[in-house]
Image (cartoon, rainbow, N blue to C red):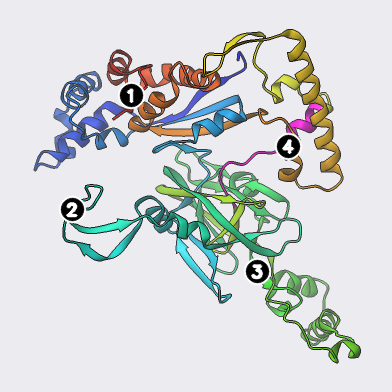
Amino acid sequence: MQRFRVEVITKTPNPQQVIYAAMHQDYTDAFVVDERDSWPSESQCGEVIVKRLLAGERGHYGPLEHPQIVFNCGYFPHSVMQQARTHRVGVSFDVQCLSGDSEVTFVKTSGGLTKIKISELYDLWTNGEKALRERKIRGRKGEAPGIYRRDCKTRLRKMKLRVLNEETGIFEIGNIKEVFDQGLQPVYRLTLEDGRTLDCTENHRLLTERGWQTMGEALELVTNNNREVITYNQNCYLMTNGVIVGKGLYQDKTWLQEQLSAGLTARQIHNQGLELEFAQNFVPIVALAQKPKPTGRKLKAHPMKVVQVRYLGLQKTYDLEVDGKWHNFVANGVVVHNSFRYTGNQFLQVLEGKKDIEDVFYLRPVGHYTDRQGKKYYYSPEQRAADLEWCMEAAKRYAASFQAGMSEEHARGIVPFDYRQHFVVSFNVRSFLHFCDLRNKKDAQLEIQKLCELMWPHFAEWTPAIAQWYEKQRLGKARLAP
């Protein structure tokens, strides 16, 4: 476990003062920012928070949700991510996300399209849909009278999400697995040559002509200390929502540009288009004698140039996790990646000698262990050596499958589950305490306990009074945090 790393990327300055201000704004008619000069110091605010909010367990813990801390975590096994994202509240991974106004494309049963803002999807996913009637009496589960909302996750999971088959370039149908609130993040607006825009973070992965890249990588984005754009790649093309297969040549700007660059006149381009469409749609006379079968309206992705990038500031952001083989979806007409991405380059680098096998695969150290049922066992040096050999063979099998043309996500299915991965995770104060209640306890997975242990010193330095209270009152007691 010596290879595990946790570093802080960013954190809200003076977090305890932020919580103090939120507490007081809830219980005063004054506008607390006007009284900023009279606020207590950071340490004094921490004492007030413990005395008036935490120690009394009054239950009004919303002020704890405002300050945010972002960690970069390295070399942890994949199972830690699986554990970390279970039963989480207000925890965001990867910090690749879209602004709330981004519209996600769904396909209706009729074949038409419907678009829903990702912020609205999150609201429906989390709070349910508003009922058509008003509850007049208290509900069976103690719900108060009034307008109420009912769970609609099952319906949302069944909706047909537009996804791209990355092997054929044709759009297909997928389904939502999860919708995430990724918190406040720095957001940039990308404007494409057809006028459409996409608001996303620098780390969000987009499908370009060169494959999957983060927005920052694809645009070779250069910014100043205030995140304002200094320069970017002027020849970046993103894959966008479709053109009809075999048709629409005159609407395909890339095809038209190729003809113009070749020096063709408008008449020549017209004739070229007719010839291509005839070849694509030609049906033998014998086939015409048979009853034609509807082929459906297949669409393919096509590239569109980015013509402008500008910084919008901090915005509330969201992301999806997509169920199925293809982990992408269409937002504002652009093909974007969903959360929880993993690549297979590291397996190839092991075989090339560029990485040590234990930098890529995680195995517990030799020693004595106990499972959750109290059963004791010994992980011997011989067994560990055999497991390392098995990891090496899996890397070879991955390389062979990948080189034979298999997609990364398909080939990755044969490698051991606990390959190492790096990830970015953000918490607010309340969600971090909740996370520690769930995972920093004696019967939790050893590796995720280590993650909590490595994050804790950073948190304690950031919010010392709150951390000191938590260590005395809750740490290791498996109580759900405020």
Q: Nearer the viewer, mark 2 or mark 1?
A: 2
Q: Is residue 333 left or right of residue 452?
A: right
Q: Nearer the viewer, mark 1 or mark 4?
A: 1
The Cα–Cα distance between marks 4 and 3, rounded to whole angstroms, is: 28 Å
Identify which amino acid the numbered label 1 is placed on: Arg
Residue ID for mark 4: 344
Who's the residue at 68% across and 54% down the image? Answer: 208
Residue ID for mark 2: 138
Q: Kindly identify which numbered label has been placed on residue 479.
A: 1
Identify which amino acid the numbered label 2 is placed on: Arg
Residue 417 image offset from top left, x and y in percent = 67, 31
Residue 303 visible in the current orientation: no
Who's the residue at 81% across and 42% down the image? Answer: 402
Q: Earlier in the sequence, mark 4 or mark 3?
A: 3
Identify which amino acid the numbered label 4 is placed on: Gly
> What kind of element bears circle 3?
strand
The answer to whether the residue labelled 2 contacts the one labelled 3, judged by CB atoms less than 8 Å apart, is no
Magenta range: 337-350
Residue 109 image offset from top left, x and y in percent = 55, 73
Residue 275, quarter of the rendered image: bottom right
Q: Could you classify mark 3 by the number of other residues whose Cα lies within 10 Å: few (under 14), some (14-19), or many (20 or more)?
A: many
Q: Quadrant of the N terminus?
A: top right
